[in-house]
Structures are given as structure tokens and as C-alpha cells.
Image (cartoon, rainbow, N blue to C red):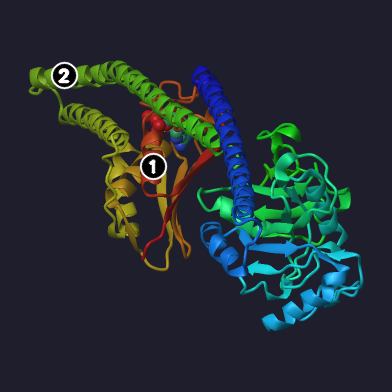
Amino acid sequence: MGLALGCGIVLSMMMALWVNRWEQLSRRTQFQQQSNNLTTALQRNLNRYTDVLLSIQDLYRVADNQVTEAMFGRFVQRALMVYPGIQALEWAPRIDHGDRPQYEQHLTQLGRGTATITERYANGQLGPATDRPDYIPVTYVEPWEGNEVALGYDLASDPIRRAALDQARDTGHLAATGRIRLVQETAAEQYSFLVFLPIFAEGNSAQGSPRSPDPLLGYVLGVFRVADVVEEALQDFSYTVDFRLYDLTGPPDQQFLGQYATTSQQVSIPANPAPLRSVSRSSLCPTVAACRQTLTFAQREWAIEFDPTSGGIATFPWGATSTLVLGLLLTGSLLLVLSRSQAEVERTREISDLKLRFFSMASHEMRTPLSIILVSAQSLAANHQTWSEGQRAKTIERIQTITKRMTQLLSDILTLSRAEANHLDLAPEIVDVTHLSKQLVDELQPELHPGQTITVEAQLTSPQAYVDPKLVRSILLNLLSNAIKYSPAHSPICLHLSQTAKTLTFRVQDQGIGIPAIAQARICETFYRGDNVGDIPGTGLGLAVVKTCVERHQGNLSIHSQEHQGTTVTVCLPWVD
Ligand code: ADP
């Protein structure tokens, strides 16, 4: 059993460890796969957006920079439909201060609610731009709905936008801004960014060489909300890892762009955004670098930091735990089966021991009385003419006594073997216990030693009890027989009957040889006899029968005895009216 338990536990733990390692590996692969997929999707979308801007640049080239608002609108229509991550595509020309009145007059004529070049003041209000040498006002806006306030807004009025405008102009390439709040942003909970592409008078802006600002006509630009960009990238696959976006090119206090939570499936900006490299490492990505991927576009670098502790990829080792539990359960069941079969073997051995003891006892206990009966019967047959009446009666009585003892022995064996085979039935019925006791006492009269008496004391409110008469008879017969056998002549025996609200109690009391203290613990075992019995006949089955019958009745048995003083046996049976 110990070996089976040890092997079971060790095997279960080994299996659990193996499953745990496998689980960890598959979780790490899943995590890496998801982060790679998202990075690829985001990078691909950003590339597409910049492609759209480059294609608008081509339009300017083809149209010799003479692009009307209507042409612009038609050209970008398809891109706006295909890429929901684009908030707006715009054209912002460079306007010299001298041309401002003419430009503003044009704005007024458009009749779209904007009559001046605007800028945002320190108090957050939008109003007429202060005088500057030149302006980059937003002029074509697609789509118009939702972006109305952008019309006339001077992009150069804001330092972050200005930095990207200058970078684009100086390099001739696409340049993205750091995080900004859009003039048309109403909710203000999201960061956005703009991507500028300069358009020069010659229309060959993409040479990469530094240029003077003179030939610059203006910029085509894309307006993007971080949340829309991320959501568009996520729409094609099921994604379960939280992440945060940072703009590595921006100053440290302006790097955080937003965080995506799989629970809400939204990008949000918390009150205290987590700083860069603050992801908690785990088995999914043991180093900060392993939790991170970077993107580059329009002269900026972004970082995505994935949160391995987010609920999407379960980190609890369910597989390993259930393997361990299953393994231990299997071990437990195996042990149960083993212990059962061991108990079965034990029982079989006990039964065969019992049988052996029974056969040796039977051969001993039955041979002697049978030979006495045979000899007595033979003598009676041979001498019945010559023997006196008294001699004949004595011989017949001896035969009867021995036969009764043998009958008792056989009935004890029957009771015990029935109980052993679980066939000792309990058949309670209404019994007059006083009458039953008196009847038994009468039956036992011939057994009494000279001068012995049995008194029946009944303290019953009602003599009727709901008990099994056969079992009660067996109990009383054995207890009274023992009291008679183990008491000397002229000693009193008392059978006391009483009842409480719940029990019916028999107490058999004698003043006989008593049971030695050392034997009392084992006295109810089959074939066990006290070593003070001398040549008093007995089989060691009586008390075992009593105990069996009491247990079958769900009662209890107690024995108080002192050597040379006497014995009191008390039987309590649950009382049923
Ligand atoms: P048996 O009487 O046939 O030996 P029991 O099972 O009835 O078998 O009793 C077991 C043993 O308990 C007896 O051998 C005896 O040692 C002891 N015993 C039982 N009842 C008494 C009693 N009333 N007085 C003294 N000893 C007793």
C-alpha cells in the first residue's frame, strides 16, 4: 500500500510537472503570437495610411498642383471608406501673412461658418490667429462632417504640429506629430496624431535633400485617432492581451498614447498612465524587452508594451492542477481498491481460522457428550431390567442434559454463522418481556445447582416491548446459563428488568467466580474463555452470541465483574412502544 501510494504521488507529480511545462510553453507561444500579430497588423495599417498620403501627393504631381476641393474630395473618398482608422484627410496650404486677407475672404465666401485663420489660445478657446509671417491653415477637409472646426485652423500655431511640419518640409518626407488633442475632438479622452507630407512647387518633393521653404506650397495630411487606428488593426482577429502604446520619439512626459483593455475592448487614457517599461514580467515574457515590440512610420518610433498579467491568456496552471488532482484521485481509488481487497483477504483468513477453530472445538466438544450419550444409552439398554427406577431416571436425565447442551451449542453456532453472513434478521414484534423472562427461568430450573435461585425483578410501566423475541431469548438464555454455570451452589441469581423512555434494560447479576480483569477486554470474542473456569464446561460462544444479538438490535452490552465476587451483565435495547 505504501509503495502504491508513493508511486502514485510521484507519478502524479511528474505528470503535473510535465503538463505544467507544456502549458507554459503553449501560453508563451500564444502570447508571442498575439503580440506579433497585433504589431504586424498595426504596422501594416500605418503603412497603408502613409501610402494614402503618398497617393494624394501623386495627385498633386499629376494635376500640376492645381487640385481643387472637389477633386481632392473625390480622390480621397475610397480611402476614407476602406480605412475607418482615418479620421480625416486634409490639405493645408502655406499662406504668407500678406495673403491672409485674401485667404480669409475666400473662407468667408465658402460660407461654412469660418471666416478667419484660427488658432487655439492658452485657455483652450479657438479664435482668430495672431499675426505671423506665414500660416498653414486647414483648407480641404474630408470628410466634412465631424471635422468642421478644423477648417481654417493654422497647423503652424501649435508647437507639436509645427515641429512635424518643419521636419516634413526639411526632409521632404512624411513626418508624424507626437500625441496631440484634435481641434475637432469633442470627447477629449483620446490622443491623436497627424501625418504631414509636404507639397513643393516643382512637385518633386521626395528628393530627401534639405530645401529652403520658398517652393513649399503646403501639406497634405492625415488625421488619426489612436483609438480608431488600434481598433481597425484589431478588427480582423480575436485578441486577448492588454497592451499600452508609447511614442518613443516624443519627450518622456508625452510618450503615453493609450492603453487597450481586452475586457472593455477599448483604448482608454487613465488618470495616471503607467510609464514606459513598467510592465510586470511573468513566465510569458521573462524580460521587459520580451513584452515589447516597436513600430516605425513617418519618422517616428512607437513601442507597444504587452501586459502578460492581463486576463486574456490564463496564467493559472489549470492543466497541471487538474492532472495532479486526477492523479491523486486515481491513486486514492487504487488504494481504496487495494485496501478493500486486503480487507477481503484478511476476512477470508479470519473465516478460515474460525472454521478451523470450530472444527477442532466441535470434534472436542461433541465427541465427549456423544460418547456419554452412547455409553448411557447402551448401559440403559443392557441393564434396564436390572436397574432400579432411580438409576434409569438418572441415566435418562444425563442424556437429556447433554443433548440440551449440544442443542444450545449448535444454535449458538447457527446464530454466529448467520450473523457472519449478514443473514441474522431482526424481526421485532410485541413481546411480553416479563412473561418471556419467567418462561426462560422455568426452563433453566433443571440446570440450577443445589440451593441456587433465580429471582426476576421487573420495574416496567408496561410489560409489552417491541423487540425480536428470538434474539432476546438467545441473549437471556446465554446470560442466565453463564450465571448458573459460574456460580456456586446456594448462591442467588437476579434477573432485573427495567425501562426508561428510550430503552429496555436486562441486568443479570450473580455472585460467582467472576471474570479475571485481564480477560475482560476479550471476553466477548468467539471461543475465548477466562482461565479461572477450571472444569466448568463451555464453548466460549455464549457471550459472542449475546454481543451479536445486542448489536443486531442496535443496543449495547456492558459487563462488570470482579474475580471471586460476581458478575453483572447489563443489556440495553432501544425501546420501541
Ligand atoms: P462459555 O460459557 O461457553 O465458556 P461464553 O462466551 O458464554 O462461553 O463465556 C465466555 C467466558 O466468559 C466464559 O468461559 C467465562 O470465562 C466468562 N464468563 C461468562 N459469564 C460469566 C459469569 N457469569 N461469571 C464468570 N465468568 C463468566
Location of residue 501 with respect to 45 vertically, above or below? below
Q: Residue at the spot x=30%, y=15% of the render?
A: 360
Q: Residue at the spot x=62%, y=68% of the render?
A: 69
Mark 1 C-beta to ligand 1 under 8 Å: no
Q: Nearer the viewer, residue 428 or 476?
A: 428
Graded by Cα atoms within 10 Å as few (under 14), some (14 to 19) or many (20 or more), the crowding at tag 1 reads many
Q: Nearer the viewer, residue 321 or 471?
A: 321
Mark 2 C-beta to ligand 1 under 8 Å: no
Q: Residue 332, image x and y in percent? A: 48, 31
Question: Which residue is the site of mark 1?
Answer: 480
Query: Which residue type carries mark 2?
Result: Leu
Tell me if 251 is positioned left or right of 241 in this view. Answer: right
Query: Which residue type carries mark 1?
Result: Leu
Which element carries disc 2, helix, strand or loop? helix
> Can residue 474 be seen at all in this image of the molecule?
yes
Q: Earlier in the sequence, mark 2 or mark 1?
A: 2
Location of residue 379 with respect to 325 vertically, above or below? above
Graded by Cα atoms within 10 Å as few (under 14), some (14 to 19) or many (20 or more), the crowding at tag 2 reads few
Tell me if 7 is positioned left or right of 358 in this view. Answer: right
Q: Report which quarter residue 150 is drawn in.
A: bottom right
Q: Which mark is residue 374?
A: 2
Q: Quadrant of ligand 1?
A: top left
Which element carries disc 1, helix, strand or loop? helix
Q: Nearer the viewer, residue 217 or 227?
A: 217
Q: Residue 175, image x and y in percent? A: 75, 49
Tell me if 475 is positioned left or right of 278 in this view. Answer: left
Q: Residue at the spot x=29%, y=34% of the render?
A: 412
Tell me if 401 is positioned left or right of 213 in this view. Answer: left
> Can residue 304 be seen at all in this image of the molecule?
no
* Tag in front: 2 or 1: 1
